[in-house]
Image (cartoon, rainbow, N blue to C red):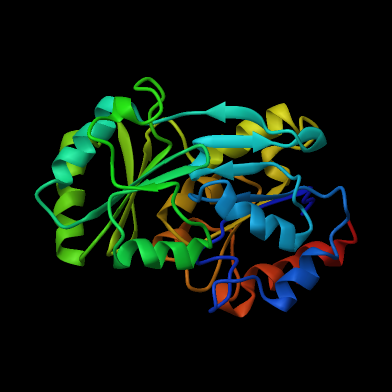
């Protein structure tokens, strides 16, 4: 195994029971060489990832945000967009209209902006999970009143009771499944992204633009959920944490301990640091 870079999911994979980085995880990552790429790869928005980068000591490392919809680099501390793929305003409007008859909370994300439908329990939960607050509360009457109608959103998040979320998932899958990825990260969540992207496509773009000397087969990736499957299959070593869905474990090359039990750190210590890269 000749691993030259690490890509890791965050929620359910890297964080402990308190939804922070454990002391063991921080200590293990800091043992990696300073020039060893560590890339956070998540459905989160940039600011919800950067505070974790700061804790890991990799603040100016590239980011793969929104499941590959936005790939960022920070040469000399300046934001550089390597890839930018969005859900069109038309499709975003259709999602909002489909949810209009429900109590489902809708949040829209674009670049580092987060617009939420309401100040409710779902918003409070997401703020607690990500340590970020929304840019604004209350969806604009039309998408054209939010930024410009040509930009679209990187991600739409739907949060609500399990029965309503199940109904909305089936409705959107039937209507828009050919154009959009719909991920059931929990039975109360739907994360929606463009069909054209994935975490795997984000890694491919990043290697091509930033690390042309590193091949996909020289990357180790860690994940737990459906949106990690393509990434684990595409890299050299795909590692599922112990709490991962069975479908994720089935495609992984290796299974480590649960995310809350420092599974990522343990694998790095036992199989990557031990090679003295």
The answer to whether residue 182 shows anywhere in this view is yes
Residue 82: give x, y in percent of width and height.
63, 28
The N terminus lies in quadrant: bottom right
Q: Give left or right: position of 243 versus 143.
A: right
Front residue of this view, candidates 215 and 124: 124
> In percent of the image, x 13 and y 46: which residue is there?
100
Q: Is residue 222 left or right of residue 175?
A: right
Vertical placement of residue 239 versus 75, above or below? below
Residue for point 61% across, 39% down: 203
Q: Is residue 4 left or right of residue 113?
A: right
Residue 157 coordinates in the image, percent (x, y): 34, 49
What residue is drawn where x is 48% and y is 49%?
43
Farthest-out residue, left: 101
Q: Nearer the viewer, residue 75 or 36?
A: 75
Query: In the image, residue 275 lies at what x, y percent?
Result: 86, 62
Horizontal placement of 230 versus 271: left or right? left
In which quadrant will I find the C terminus?
bottom right
Residue 227: horizontal and vertical position, in percent? Answer: 44, 50
Figure label count:
0
Asked whether residue 8 is in view, the answer is no
- Residue 261 higher or lower than 138, as above or below: below
């Amino acid at each position: 195994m000749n691993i030259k870079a690490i890509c890791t999911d965050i929620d359910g994979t890297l964080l402990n029971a308190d939804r922070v980085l454990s002391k063991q995880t921080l200590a293990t990552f800091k043992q990696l060489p300073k020039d060893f790429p560590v890339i956070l790869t998540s459905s989160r928005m940039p600011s919800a990832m950067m505070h974790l980068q700061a804790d890991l000591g990799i603040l100016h490392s590239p980011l793969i945000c929104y499941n590959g919809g936005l790939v960022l680099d920070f040469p000399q501390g300046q934001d550089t967009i390597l890839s930018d793929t969005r859900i069109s305003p038309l499709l975003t409007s259709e999602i909002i209209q489909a949810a209009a008859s429900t109590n489902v909370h809708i949040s829209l994300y674009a670049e580092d902006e987060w617009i939420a439908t309401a100040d409710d329990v779902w918003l409070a939960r997401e703020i607690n999970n990500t340590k970020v607050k929304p840019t604004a509360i209350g969806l604009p009457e039309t998408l054209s009143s939010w930024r410009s109608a040509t930009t679209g959103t990187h991600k739409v998040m739907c949060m609500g009771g399990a029965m309503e979320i199940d109904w909305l998932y089936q409705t959107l899958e039937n209507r828009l499944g050919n154009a959009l990825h719909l991920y059931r990260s929990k039975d109360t969540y739907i994360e929606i992204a463009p069909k054209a992207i994935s975490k795997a496509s984000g890694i491919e773009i990043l290697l091509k633009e930033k690390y042309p000397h590193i091949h996909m087969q020289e990357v180790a990736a860690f994940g737990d959920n459906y949106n990690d499957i393509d990434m684990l299959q595409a890299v050299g070593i795909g590692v599922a944490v112990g709490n991962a869905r069975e479908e994720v474990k089935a495609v992984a090359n290796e299974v480590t301990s649960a995310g809350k039990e420092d599974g990522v750190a343990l694998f790095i210590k036992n199989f990557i640091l031990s090679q003295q890269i």
